[in-house]
Each structure stands twice: as structure tokens, then as C-alpha cells.
Amino acid sequence: EGSMSDPDERNEFVEPYLTWNAMRPQLPCKLSDLVTPAFIVDISIVKRNCELMIAKAKSSGVRLRPHVKTHKTIEIAKMQVGGDLNNGIVCSTLSEVSFFASNGFTDITYGIPITFMKLLPLYQISNKTGCKISLIVDSVVQLDELKAFFGNQKNAHFGCFLKIDTGYHRAGVDVKLHKEIGLEIARRISQETNLTFRGVYSHSGHGYHALDTADAQRISFEECKEAKLFTEFLRENSINCETISVGSTPSCGSSDQFPGATEIHPGNYVFFDRQQVQAGACKEADIAVCVLTRVIGHYESSGHMLCDAGSLAMSKDLATQDDHLGAVEGCDLVLQSVSQECGKLMMKQPENGKRPAFNMDDHPRGSLLKIIPNHSCLTAACHPLYYIVENDTVIDVYKPCRGW
Amino acid sequence: EGSMSDPDERNEFVEPYLTWNAMRPQLPCKLSDLVTPAFIVDISIVKRNCELMIAKAKSSGVRLRPHVKTHKTIEIAKMQVGGDLNNGIVCSTLSEVSFFASNGFTDITYGIPITFMKLLPLYQISNKTGCKISLIVDSVVQLDELKAFFGNQKNAHFGCFLKIDTGYHRAGVDVKLHKEIGLEIARRISQETNLTFRGVYSHSGHGYHALDTADAQRISFEECKEAKLFTEFLRENSINCETISVGSTPSCGSSDQFPGATEIHPGNYVFFDRQQVQAGACKEADIAVCVLTRVIGHYESSGHMLCDAGSLAMSKDLATQDDHLGAVEGCDLVLQSVSQECGKLMMKQPENGKRPAFNMDDHPRGSLLKIIPNHSCLTAACHPLYYIVENDTVIDVYKPCRGW
């Protein structure tokens, strides 16, 4: 289990330029056997995060339709659905839809408002794999595009959600300002024979800016309330919603009840990150991932150390309340700035004080550090391979889906 | 030429989840045939940028050792060296070294200060391919590590540069403060039989913060002066530098003379970007790349449009003087904020004024936009495939090196 010593068993990983392959470590191996930077996934924490979200959905009486965009791996998606490939998932790219549909998932929602160009690929994926694919719609003109498409592809069929805006103001029909438009769209979806109306879909992305757990709970509660009010309005107009789908990781991580909703669709919770701690969605011990890096230089006169994790290994996402690119586990060092392939480590700047000095001899050249990412979705996306770890032993390597 | 209609000819691109393959457009094709987001490279501009840098090096009497980290493709690296695979290049990761060495390049400098862990992979690559690999060293302790390594690998041999800090203060020996340390390192490199001392290497990364062309020129001039002073000091101590290597794209783009240097090593100039325009290194017409995206929604009540280029297609790098993630070619729209797979388009905020309204009907749903990136190195790194364009016709697809 986990051993990949025979090169022939691993040809899916063989690309000429992947150093890990050039080195061919036997699995299991130690963290210190890895070339850095490397994306490390503590799989016990991922499993626990997945089980807790399944349990939370169950105890609060909603279904869980997990988003897979944070990790984009078959292995972790299976943990999110408790092994049930018929449990719906949400994807954020066509390549994800193709990847998960080709690997046995049977109910996939493409979570970005649909445009004409993406209909044919989605139909082809659905045709080839038998996967039921659902779309997200938030304007009347999309129904015209769908009608045009179905004119040429008479056998195509999709599920369809009406996307509603309950406060994030990125996408969706604003149900406070424009509920009549929402009704019209829901009606047209219901009337379209090549579509099955599945209900409403809201994403409380503003939960990412929550100040603490209570604030995240308030946002979650508001989202549920608005979604429920709107679906009652739809019902008064003879349109029933099978599904009222809400949530983001901040709202689902912080809340235990989703009154009025029938479904939640968080994604980041598999890994969590520093931003989620700040938003009150988890504790530091729930963060499942880090970037493993090595100290590559001491620069006493500038007061910094360099490590081999730069912007390509971390992303340049700043956490909401910080000025740095990540925090080193187990000490007060932070990744203060990054170039493409290296990062400057300094002591964390206190809120109203001078940056303390630190003893670089505590971190000799070559020593390993774990950097906790600000935003794990973007950091994970930097890495073509994930190193799967249990008790600091590398037991497996996952290859995520990439591209569009 | 450029046609890839036979699937068997293209198996290097076949990964199950790449939509482009699922769609299999025949090449050449139109931009509108591409699924978005897509990274577009105007190859005529790349060729021109490469030829101009070769000509500039020639006319100013220095060699050009181009950095390949911005694009990481064999095709463009060949343009950078005018087809001469014996012309040295600089890489920023082990995977790049492996990739370019395996594809015929014979003189590669690994541009990050060397650490022990990376010596064995570099030696293996060198052994397997015959490529001459050079290291970057900036501390005495690295020489101890190298000595330990050569104790076990008696036949290993590397070229070696002393990295000097001429003002950027990221890495290198600060030659204003510590020239005696620099001398000691140079001496020890020269004495090590498994190393060949090649000279000094400086990176004027602070050129990225230049205010304009004159400022970038001043930084370049200072760098050359400091490097020259230090190598004169080495010569007084009987150590000759074959190579005095300087530069970054801001300094090499803005300057025509590099007095005292024998070599320049810019990289970003193949693509350029908005940041380089700001730093005075190029004009907008020199930018060779963009992210092709489609409008996916009009949200009148929030005053924004959505497009399908988000943080995973753009990176989250903010240009030095801007507050947004990229500018739309041919109009005043900017990518004001990004989620993972979509971005908010708004009118550019004037310096001291109100954001103007705009007519969304000018950009109907589904219409194509080209977003000029702030920092092309990071944007390119987001993309597993580059779509190669001439006169807005896609004529080829390049697959860059990824990972570590």
C-alpha cells in the first residue's frame, strides 16, 4: 500500500522534467528525502475534515454536495463523498468536469455561470461518460443561448440551477433587488425540455471576509434566510425547488445549522488554511497542508533567511489580515516576500512594534521548514504533485487535475 | 507546419482532463475556437524581443546568457540563443535544468544559491545528458557542503559562480560590506578541483521597482560599477573572473551599455508585461502575451462584468503602481478582483476621481477579451499549455516545463 518502487507502475507520473521522478524515492519515505519545495498533505487531517463535514451535514439535515476545486484529486473527492460516487460534486473548470466524470463520478455541477462556448464540451463529456451534468444560470439571455444549443443538439440534457446572489455580489440574481427576474429564469428553466430545474444555488463568498466565527455564522444565517425567502416566492408562483444549496467553507465551517437550506457545497474545508482560521471556520490544528521548504541562505546584514519556496510554490495571495505570504509552523517566522523561486523569511512584524531579531543558527542551511499557506486553494494549484503524508512519512503521491 | 490534426502526432499533449484535447481543434484555428481562459503568445513579438536582446548584447560587447524561467519552453529558449544550444542559459528549478539538458542545451546555470540536497539531482542530470551545469554560491558554508558531496562523488564536476549582491539585498555577498568574504569564497571555489570558477553573478532585481527608464538605467549602471569594482579587487588578489554577469529585464531592457560587465542574463524580456512598461523596460507594443477570456455575465446592479479568467489564470500579482490584476487590451477595463475561476471587470479607477460608468452592451456575453498581465512570469506559470499565435491565428501549442 503506497509503495511505488516499480517505475512501470508509475508511468502516469513520468514526465521528463519532474525531479521527484528523477530522484525516484521509494515510498514510504521521509520528508527529508523530498526535493523542496513540495506540497504536503496530512491525509489524516483531510479524512477528519471530510468526515466532520459529512457528519455536520447529516446532523443538520442537509445534503452535502462538496466542491472539489481546492484539491482537484480523485482520491480526496472520494473522501468528501464518503466513497459514494453518486453523491453530487461541484467543479470549477471543464477539465475538472472531464477528469471527475471520467473517473466514475455521476452527478457533477459546473459551478461557473454557463456560457455558450462551454456547452458542447460539457455535452461531449456527459455523452462519453454517462455523467449527469448540471449548469448554473443567472440571466435570461443564457436561456436563449441554451435554446440555440439544443436546437442543434436535440438529445443534450443538463440539470440546471438558478444562481442567486444573497450578498456576495459577484454573480447570481440579486434576490433582494430582482426577484421577478429570478422567477422568470426559474420558469424558463422549468419549461425547457432539455433542462431539469434542480433549484437555487448561492455562494456566500463574503464569508471569507468574516471577522470571526460569530460574523461568519451571521453571514451563513443571512444566506439561508434569503435563499429560503426567495424559494418561498418561487413556490407561491408554482415553482418548486428540489434543492436549496448554500454555503462556503467559512459559513459551513462556522455554522451547525442551515435553516431553510437543503444542501451545502463547501470545498476549501478539506485543507483549510490561515485565512479560514482568521474567518473563524477552523482551528490551526485543522489545516491539513503546508509547503515544505529548505533554508537556502542566511543574510545577516539584511536580517533575513532565504528559503526555496517562492511565488510559484506559494501563490501571492495575502491573507485578509496579514502582510505576508505564509507562516512557518512552530515558530514566529513568516514568509515576508517572495521572488519566483525563493522567499525571504523574517520574524513576524508585531502590530505596534519593531520586528524582533532572531537567531539564524536555529535554522541552519538545508533545514526543513513547513510554511502554512494563506489560501490553500491557490497554493495547491501551484503544484503538479501532492505528497501525501501520515505522521511525517510520505506514503503516496497524488496527481491533481490542472488546466481548463 | 503547425498542423496537429493527427491525434497520434500529439500524444505528448494527451492528458485526460485537458479540454483543449477534448475539443481537438484543428490547427491553425481562430482565437474564437479556443476554450477560455487560454494563455496566448504572439510569437512574432517574442521573436522580435529575442532578436533585439541578442543584437543589444552584441552591440554593447557582452555575451547573453538568457534566463528561461519566464516561459520554460524549449521552443522559446532556442529563440533566446539564436538557435545555438551551446549558448549558456539560466534555469530556476531542477525540473527546468533536467528539461533543457534533456533537450540539447549544453551549458546551464542553476540560478538559485545551491544547497546540498540539490547536488545529487544536478550531478545525475549532468551525467545523463552531458550538460555542463554551473552552480551559484554565496557563502563559505556552501563550499563545505560541496566538499562533502565531492567526497562521495569524486567524478562530479560543476562550473561555479560567486553570487554578489549589488543592491537588491535578496541573496549574494554584499560586496560593499563584505568584499573580504567574497574573496575568500572565490578563492575556495578556485581551489576546489571539482569546480571551475566562472566569475561573478549579480541580479538587479530592484530594477523591478524602477520609477522609469532613467531610474532603471541608473540601477543597471550601479550594478555594473559595483560588479566591476569587486572583480578588480579579486584580480588584485590574483583571482581572474572569466565572466562578470549582470542584469534583469528592467536593467537590460532600459540600458544599451553595461560598462564593466561581460555578460547579461535577463529573462522576462521574451514576454514583457505591464510591470516592465512601468519600469521603463519596454513599450506596451512589446508585450507578447495575454490571457484570452470571455465575458460570462453582466451584473448591472453591482456595476461589473464577470469573465472566466480568475486567480488561477492570472496569478494574484499586483503591478507595482496599480490596484488591479490586469488591463483589458483596447479599452479602459481592468480586472479589478479575482476569484479562483472568474474575475470582475470594471472601468479603471482614475487617480483622483470616480470610477466611470461603462456600457456593458459593448461587451456582450461570450465576447472575447485579452487581458494584459501585470507579471507575465507568474501568469505564464498558471498555464499548462501556451497557445501560439500569429496575426490572431493559433498556429501551434507549446507545453512548458512545470514543477520542481
Image (cartoon, coloured by chain):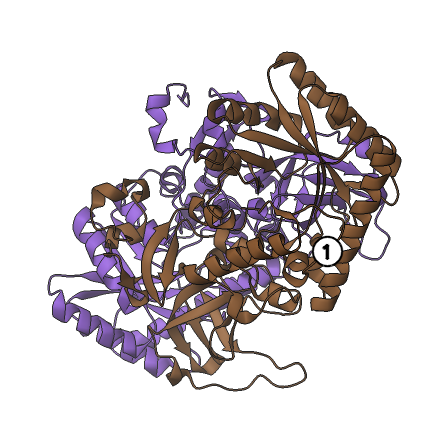
Chain colours: A purple, B brown
Task: Residue under label 1, please give it.
Answer: B206
Residue B404 visible at all: no
Q: Secondary structure at mark 1?
A: helix
Residue B92: name its quadrant: top right
- Residue at 13%, 71% in the rendered image: A151
A130 shown above or below B151 = below
Residue A334: name its quadrant: top right
Q: Seen in the image, is A77 located left or right of residue B358?
A: left
Label 1: few (<14), some or many (≥20) within 10 Å? some
In this view, which residue lies farthest toward the left?
A154
Measured as percent of width and height from the top left, residue A392 is found at 57, 26
Q: Seen in the image, is A152 located left or right of residue B230?
A: left
- Residue at 49%, 29% in the rendered image: A20
Measured as percent of width and height from the top left, residue A200 is found at 34, 66
Measured as percent of width and height from the top left, residue A226 is found at 44, 71
Q: Seen in the image, is B160 located left or right of residue A219?
A: right
Residue B204 visible at all: yes
Which kind of residue does numbered mark 1 sit on?
His
Q: Seen in the image, is A386 located left or right of residue A179?
A: right
- Residue at 72%, 54% in the rendered image: B258
Residue A84: name its quadrant: top left
Instruction: Write down the chain letter for disc 1.
Output: B
Measured as percent of width and height from the top left, residue B33 is found at 28, 64
Viewer-closest of A98 and B282: B282
B288 shown above or below B121 = below
Viewer-closest of B277 and A168: B277
- Residue at 47%, 58% in the rendered image: B46
